[in-house]
Image (tube, helix red, strand yellow):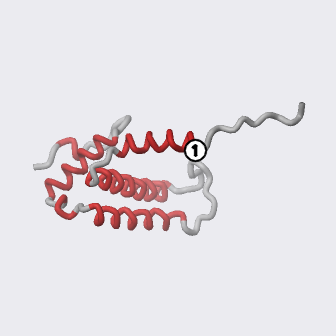
Amino acid sequence: METSHEFSTKTSDVSLQELKDRLAEFAKVRGWDQYHSPRNLLLALVGEVGELSEIFQWKGEVARGLPNWSPDDKERLEEELSDVLLYLVQLADVCGLDLGQAALSKIVKNAKKYPVVNQTSSYN
């Protein structure tokens, strides 16, 4: 039996934990979790990244906020970005990794690797 929250789509802030839980339930009730090995999820993720890439393939540079895009183009982009995110969350879950914590740790590592450089004006 499907849970009622499965069809709820409007929320102000969604956690990775909520996505992980909903994805696990979605796959479980359909019997799909048996196919969600790390390898299979990675290959699905790569396929979705390819579909995402196709959207930008011939557009050249795109302005922030996509001001010249049609609502249909934006909706397609939203869907493909969501597919990538959902497969990434599932992959991390199946591998037993805390994706949110890993991302925060990576930001800290990058901050140490690429420190802010003070840029003083040479116009003194």
Place residue 118 in its image quadrant: top right
**For mark 1, does the 10 Å Cα neighbourhood hold few (<14), some (14 to 19), or many (20 or more) residues?**
few
Above-or-below relation of 116 to 40:
above
Above-or-below relation of 54 to 124:
below
> Front-most of 13 and 116?
116
Q: Position of residue 120 (x, y in %)?
A: 79, 34
> Front-most of 104 and 9?
104
Q: Position of residue 60 (x, y in %)?
A: 62, 64
Say what secondary structure mark 1 lies in.
helix
Quarter of the image for the C terminus: give it.
Answer: top right
In this figure, which residue is indicated by the disc labeled 1? 113
115 relative to 24 in the view: left or right: right
- Residue extending furthest right? 124
Count of labels shown? 1
3 relative to 65 in the view: left or right: left
Above-or-below relation of 36 to 104:
below
> Front-most of 104 and 71?
104
Above-or-below relation of 98 to 54:
above
> Front-most of 93 and 70?
93
Q: Position of residue 95 (x, y in %)?
A: 28, 54
- Residue extending furthest top? 124
Residue at image position (40%, 44%) is: 102
- Residue extending furthest left? 1
Q: Position of residue 29 (x, y in %)?
A: 14, 54
Mark 1: amino acid:
Lys
